[in-house]
C-alpha cells in the first residue's frame, strides 16, 4: 500500500493557493494536499492519504516530486 503523507489542515502554517483538501484515511482529519501531492494522486490512484500525525515522516519516506520546493514540512519547532 502506498501512502501519501499530508499535513493536517489545522496544523498548516502556510496555505498553498492551489492546494485541495482531503481526509486522512486513518483518523478522518481534514488534510491539505499541495500540487505535488495532487500529482502523486493522479499518477497513483490507489494512494492512501495519511496525515502527519498518524504517520510521522520517516527518513526514507517517499517525498512527492517537487515537494522539497514547497513548505510541505514546515512545522512548529518543538523537539528538533
Ligand atoms: Zn490521521
Image (tube, helix red, strand yellow):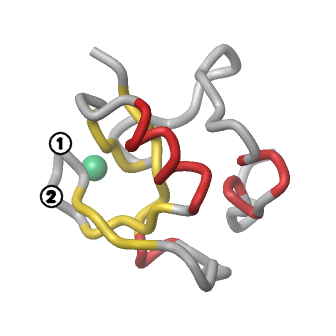
Mark 2 is surrounded, within 10 Å at the Cα level, by few (under 14), some (14 to 19) or many (20 or more) other residues, namely few
Which residue: 37% across, 29% down? 44
Residues at badges 2 and 1 in contact (C-beta under 8 Å)?
yes
Q: Quadrant of the C terminus?
A: top right
Q: Is residue 36 left or right of residue 1?
A: right
Q: CA distance from mark 2 to mark 1?
A: 6 Å
Name above or below for residue 48 compared with residue 60.
Answer: below
Task: Give the total of numbered labels.
Answer: 2
Look at mark 1 in the image and give the residue it sits on.
26
Which residue: 28% across, 34% down? 45
Mark 1 C-beta to ligand 1 under 8 Å: yes
Q: Can you give x and y, in whole percent of width and height, for residue 24 in the image?
A: 25, 52
Mark 2 C-beta to ligand 1 under 8 Å: yes
Which residue: 84% across, 54% down? 69
Name above or below for residue 20 compared with residue 50.
Answer: below
Residue 1, located in which quarter of the rendered image?
A: top left
Query: What SS does tag 2 mark?
Result: loop
Q: Nearer the viewer, residue 39 or 20?
A: 39
Residue 21, located in which quarter of the rendered image?
A: bottom left
Query: What SS does tag 1 mark?
Result: loop
Mark 1 is surrounded, within 10 Å at the Cα level, by few (under 14), some (14 to 19) or many (20 or more) other residues, namely few
Which residue: 61% across, 51% down? 36
Look at mark 2 in the image and give the residue it sits on.
28
Q: Can you give x and y, in whole percent of width and height, for residue 11 in the image?
A: 50, 72
Mark carried by residue 66? none
Amino acid at each position: 500500500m502506498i501512502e501519501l503523507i499530508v499535513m493536517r489542515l489545522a496544523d498548516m502554517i502556510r496555505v498553498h493557493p492551489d492546494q485541495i483538501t482531503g481526509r486522512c484515511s486513518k483518523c478522518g482529519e481534514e488534510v491539505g494536499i499541495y500540487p505535488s501531492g495532487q500529482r502523486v494522486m493522479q499518477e497513483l490512484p490507489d494512494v492512501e492519504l495519511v496525515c502527519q500525525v498518524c504517520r510521522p515522516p520517516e527518513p526514507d519516506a517517499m517525498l512527492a516530486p517537487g515537494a522539497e520546493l514547497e513548505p510541505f514540512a514546515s512545522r512548529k519547532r518543538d523537539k528538533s
